[in-house]
Amino acid sequence: MDLDKLRKTAAEIVSRDDVKYLLGWRRGTFGYRVAPYFIEDAAGVDELIFSPLCISNLATYLTLVEKLPVPRGQEPDQRKVALLVKGCDSRAVAQLLVEKGIKREEVVVIGLPCPGMVDRELLAEKYPETEAAAEVKWDGEDFLLVGEGGETAIPRTEVLAEKCRLCRHPNPVISDLTIGEPVEPWATADDSGVAEIEAKETAERWAYWEEQFSKCIRCYSCRNACPLCYCEDCILDRLDPTWVNRAVNFSENTAFHLARAFHLAGRCIECGECERVCPAGIPLGKLNRKLARTVREEYGFEPGLDPEAEPFQAGYKPDDPEEFIL
Amino acid sequence: MTEKPKLGVYICHCGINIAATVDVEEVTEYAQSLPNVVVARNYSYMCSDPGQLLIKNDIKEHGLNRVVVASCSPRMHEPTFRKALQEVGLNPYYLEMANIREQGSWVHEDREAATAKAKTLVAAAVAKVRLLEPLTSREVDAEPAALVIGAGIAGIQAALDIADAGFKVYLVEKSPSVGGRMAQLDKTFPTLDCSACILTPKMVDAANHPNIELLAYSEVEEVGGFVGNFDVKVRKKARYVDVSKCTGCGDCAKECRLANRFPNEFDEGLGKRSAIYLPFPQAVPAKYTIDPEKCLFLTRGRCGKSPKCVDACRAEAIDFEQKDEIVTFKVGAIVVATGFDVFDPAKKPEYGYTDYPNVITGLEMERLVSASGPTGGDIVVHNGEEEITPKEIAFIQCVGSRDQSVGNEYCSRVCCMYTAKQAHLIKDKIPDATVKVYYMDVRAFGKGFEEFYDRVRREGIRYVRGNPSEIFKRGNKLVVKVEDTLTATPLEDEFDLVVLAVGLEPRSDDRKIIDLLRLSQSPDRFFLEAHPKLRPVDTASDGVFLAGCCQGPKDIPDTVAQAKGAAASALIPLARGKVAIDAQVAEVIEDTCRGCGFCVSICPYTAIELVTINRMGHSVEVARVNEALCKGCGSCSAGCLSNSIQPRSFRDRQILPQIAALGGIR
Amino acid sequence: MSEQFEPNIVAFLCNWCSYAGADLAGTSRIQYPANIKIIRVMCSGRVNPLYVVNALQQGADGVLVSGCHPGDCHYMEGNFYARRRLKLLKELLEFTGVDPRRFNMSWVSASEGHKWKEVVEKAVEDARAAGPFDQFRRRQIGW
């Protein structure tokens, strides 16, 4: 990764009059952690990084940032937001465009072909001793762990994040400019996590999810981290009508997670943020990926590839599958 | 702040229709215990005047502001009770019905189960009615014109009535002439008037009426919009004859290289026509048409040195360059009068219709006996060897009717009588003929029918009760094999001619009309009326009405009566000049709408658009509903992730409590 | 013999086809189990798939959604949307271990009173076989 070029480009972009800030990543407070980074002027670019640790999807911030009331007599800030996107992140941008969550002219999209991200927790688990001050780089088929004790090569497959193992679109699908050479998409593994659950008996599946959903503390992190869960007033928060009670118990948790997963059907771009941020370790990505696969295989549709596409849930084909209907 | 709900719950006995299976007292007692219920009563007929009065008095006395009626289907009496509420000044939309008859007492025998279910349904209605909102229906202008599809007697009559009332009518007929089936008939039962003599003047009237635009040889291609404002697209098929020049002289048909080569549809194939033709002498408009599938010039690109019709036509009306023409217009109401097909007896091979030329259908008999028919009214048939005047003639009833084996369970209603009529006509023309009618039952139910049936029997027509099993040939005779079920005698009777009294079937191309107008079919495959008793000419599509045999088999008087009924119904929006728009349309909650446009994509009526509004200084897009276009289906709502678009009276906040009540967890 | 479990079924029917079909079953006095309780909506397209989840949570052992046959929708397209949405919901429910017999969808026209009876009988049999869905019931607040 040519960091210099990235920083130079970033500096040019944030210096533009029509750009409000640039969204990127910088090193976090500890170890392998990486934090989102809002850069408002060129001086800030020195801390900008792009490494196998930059797993978070910055597209979330496009809609997460609150639109504060504009004082009387003032005009709202119409400047663009620039952001760095990996393949998966770019699909979120494309899907946001489909849903008019953002407008094309409101963003400057800087594409970064992505050779795959590291699962930070897996890495810390396997190499705890290096965590305090380590950096991770791509090195051909390996990840390179750079720490005080020198460089350690780790086979890519050992710590590759699950979503990256399954990634079909490592190169940005939409961007104003791209930094770095396109990467060759790799042969993706079957989604064994989903298949494993599908292979279970109904009662076993229920038992599996009962255990998972029971862990939920209803912190709503999954919803907040999702780039496509951006209703200002989520129906699952509402009291009139009450779709889901606030009580944290298995019944309400299940209703919540079914609703969340359903709302993402045909929309989820499989960036895996929901699952990554879950403090209870619920494998939420499996729910989304299950539906994404149905949509892909039975309807031939993949969201977040074409900003002009018809929204999946707002469309139909006369010959959609209906073998389940009596 | 809306006032506190004060509910009245009314449980109907419907005589014993409900009360015999549902313990109405128990349900009433239960209703009384539900939250916000001020008064709960039961009564023998809630829909009757005293029943409605009960509700009205309670509204006045107890200050009720919500009403639940547990009775029949809301599809039946919702308008009745809405009106009752309105009459005492309560908003008509403060009503919810619990369907404890069609979906309760009539489908469950177990009194305990039916009562328990009725209680639950009442609880759900109570849960919903508390959250209903007052609505006002609005009106839009109705286009003062009507479309009539099909110009048989039903369509002609409907068109004439609407036109006579002073409104524009577009009368669309797919064949080259108006007249339909009735024009093919010789005499009509039971009065024996000449069919053509009573029909032709009406055909001419329809063609010449200043308010009727006749679009013959045309088909409706598209219908959009809704009651009061339908957008119609009609294809006028090319006749290849300039109708403004054609004088109807017929020289072209005489000269046509393929003169009299093709079976004439009007004569049921018994007569012949040319590639350029007039379906029948009294055709309206009396203009010739070139059959594009038969004409040499149109199919092969040449016809001798030059087409003979062109040479023959002194009016220079032939125009091979003519193209189909698309006509568009707006109407406020539509009458469907597309008629019927006759049953194809080839589906009953045991009767040998396709094998023996002297086995014919009733409609063929009409042409044969008609003075304007191919034989000039002489009854002559070919028995396979020679042309003969038949002396022994059989009629077989119920061919393709009341017959599950061909999928037609219904009675076609006209065959008994047209058989009697034809038997009489045969006796008239061939006095020494023997005529036998094989029947299952004779249904002579109409005015003058029984008398006529009696008359023909006295004339010597023999009625034999039995359903023939087979027709076969013996020598030059046809043998009808049958058991006389009154005497239990197996018979093999010999005849010169067998007439199959074929029944009526839905048009084979009905599907097109169904798709155009969103109609439903009843189990017999004819078009379904909105209610079998109370709305027999209406359909589930507002502003679309049915006339004649497209809705089910009927004779001419019934057809004309229904056509006049359909015309009167179609005239309602035209005469009022306004149509009410359903108040139960969708509403956008702009505060939570995120402007994603899903609803815009979903709406089948393009009733939703995105508009830019100012939200705290920011320009944002939100959905907006055009209430004149919205039909209240609610598809947008189920597709809205933030539930920001909600159909009135079917909002999430109104349905979820219903679900809770039915689920039983409170 | 122990008493047979009587499941509670909530059904969502479109006004124009299935609800009319159910009414026709009534007018024709076609008998079917009383386990089914109907909510009338104008179109199957109105049925938010989350209603199904909500019904199961609030006491239904089975849910049925019924609309017009494809191409016959009174609103032209509503049942097509319903079909797509509810297929996804069905997949999701199955994946999370909800017995697939708890959710059925059907096309029943205004003239199919007999089909309505068959659909109800199937929905009831299915839910009966799946048993009471107590695990998912909304917990009652106890204060």
Image (cartoon, coloured by chain):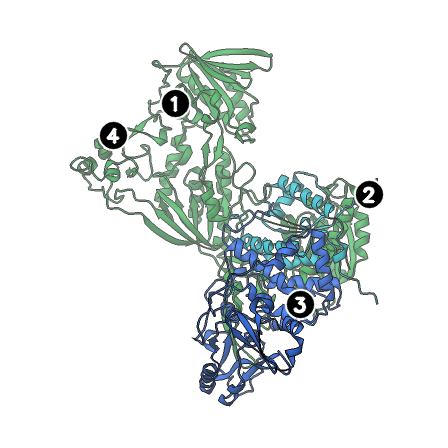
Chain colours: A blue, B green, C cyan
Residue with the mark numbered 2: C3
As drawn, the label of residue B369 is 1
Q: Say which mark, if any, is on residue A236.
A: 3
**Camera-side mark, 4 or 2:** 2
Find out whether the residues at labels 3 and 1 contact each other: C-beta distance under 8 Å: no
* Chain ID at mark 3: A
Q: CA distance from mark 4 to mark 1?
A: 24 Å
Q: Secondary structure at mark 4?
A: loop
Q: Where is residue C140, by image quadrant?
A: bottom right
CB of mark 4 within 8 Å of CB of mark 2?
A: no
Residue type at mark 1: give it: Val
Left or right: residue C27 versus residue B350 is right
Q: Position of residue B548 (x, y in %)?
A: 48, 38
Q: Which residue is mark 4?
A: B259
User: Mark on residue A265?
Assistant: none
In the image, residue B201 above or below residue B327: above
Residue A136 vertical position relative to residue B193 in the rendered view, above or below: below
What is the secondary structure assignment of the residue under circle 3?
A: helix
Q: Amino acid at mark 2?
A: Glu
The Cα–Cα distance between marks 3 and 1, rounded to whole angstroms, is 77 Å
Q: Quadrant of residue B287?
A: top left
Residue A218 position (above or below residue B380): below
